[in-house]
Image: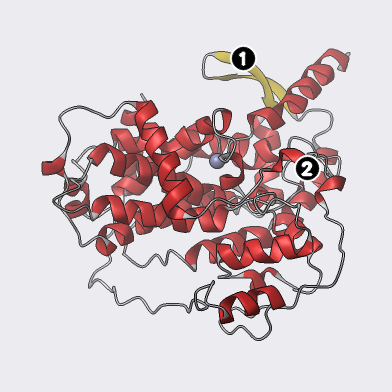
Amino acid sequence: MNRRPLELLAGAIVCSLPALLTGWGFSPHRHIHAKAWTQLPRDLQEAWGGDPTVLVRHATSADARKHTDTLEPSRHYLDLDDVLDVWTEPSSSAELVGVSWQDYRTMVTSVDSTLDPRRFGVLPWQLHWTYRKLVALMAATDSTPVALDDVLRTAADLGHYLADAHVPLHTTGNYNGQRTNQTGIHALWETHNVEHLMASHTCDLSEALPDYDPLWTPWDILRTSHRDVAHVLAAEAEWRQLTQAHGWALRRRGRTLSMLPSPEALHCWDSLTGHRTWPRFCETSHIVASAWVSAWHDAGTPTLDHSRPALREPGMLYLFKTWLHERFHAHPPVGPLSRRIPRRLESRRPKRTHPTWTSRGTFHVARQPLEVAHARRRGHLGQPVARRASPRRPSHHGHVRPRAAEGLVAGLLA
Ligand SMILES: [Zn+2]
């Protein structure tokens, strides 16, 4: 059989994938939110109006905004390897854990004042900012009544960013295998395989606890994801060898026929990656639920359904308010954008003019960059944050029937 046309078609599709990179894919993101909803305590479900439709519908809104907001793309990843490559002294990502955005920004500009601090991504800080925004929205006062639609959209964004943090390829500059001739690996990991698994797998879900720490949990997730990067890349190289001849097939995806990895090839891929994707997927939905519950507790467990606005806020107004909040409240402007920096990989590395980096401990700041230490002495920076011991420990940990969750997901996506 002449495989040439099929190979060319597969190659064309693979080459077009980088433009479609979304993080877990459209359908998996929605499934994660729907499963997270089923793990919420009933009180919170009722406080949020008893209807997960908005949460599920907006599960991918953050990806959609990449086309209209130049700040949006960097909110979905943190290239830990590139960060460590720029600053050679921290020997592992552990030394970055908990660093504040202000300190990180100072470190970046101390290496190269023209380097955009958002260049390697802002995901851990974005998770913190979005969490704070969600708490603030729910803790509205009499003078600023709660807009439930805002709350649900922000919760959907928080869930989206959290889901992205669980994907190994969202923690590396080699996010689509473009540096190792493995283009297409991103969609293989987070979309094709997950969609294949969703057809036959369920999650063992349990009621979420308010045990999400908005400062430390994002770093824990990112570091766990990053530890899998080398394994995933090695698995893809082996998978490519094994499935070279028969790995792709025409399959229906939605309303279209696409050239996708065959079910047999995906089974092989899942095996080579140690069957770790599905547990990660289920864990993601649970942590999204935990984050929502924790934010609700931090806001004082308000009942929001009575505050539902009569008219839904237009989408453009919501985007404008989000932009205002993130520009002037969540974090201050960070200076010039990365337009001046070419997007090619090699040019990502700044020139090192002098050795300014010193390592920063996770819980104790043993040695700090001089600029940070000086700024802190002058009172321009806050004190180093310490891991908080969460006082929230609910008394029970109920079980959610997996099939109930699957039914809800199917109904919402129908
Ligand atoms: Zn994303």
Q: Which residue is mark 1?
A: 257
Three-letter amino acid code at the position of disc 1: Leu
Q: Position of residue 321 (x, y in %)?
A: 37, 38
Q: Amino acid at mark 2?
A: Ile
Reading the image, the residue beneath label 2 is 341
Expressed as whole percent of the image width and height from the top left, the position of residue 279 reads 52, 54
**Image point 72% across, 45% down: which residue?**
175
Label 2 SS? loop
What kind of element bears circle 1? strand
Side (left or right) of 316 relative to 200: left
Q: Nearer the viewer, residue 275 or 358?
A: 358
390 to 339, vertically: above or below = below
Q: Residue at x 76, y 30 (%)?
A: 247
Considering the image in quadrants, where does the N terminus appear?
top right
- Dot 2 alpha-carbon crowd within 10 angstroms: few under 14, some 14 to 19, many 20 or more: some
**Rendering coords of residue 3 (x, y %):** 86, 17
| Ligand 1 placement by image quarter | top right
The answer to the question of whether label 2 and label 1 lie on touching residues, with beta carbons closer than 8 A, is no
Measure the alpha-carbon separation of dots 2 and 1.
39 Å
The answer to whether residue 306 is above or below residue 229 is above
392 or 5, which is in the foreground? 392
**Considering only order in the chain, which callout, 1 or 2, is on the residue closer to the N terminus?**
1
Q: Is residue 207 visible?
A: no
Between 239 and 96, the residue placed more toward the observer is: 96
Task: Give me the disc on residue 345.
Answer: none
Q: Residues within 10 Å of mark 1 (few under 14, many from 20)?
A: few
What residue do we see at 84% from left, 44% from top? Answer: 179
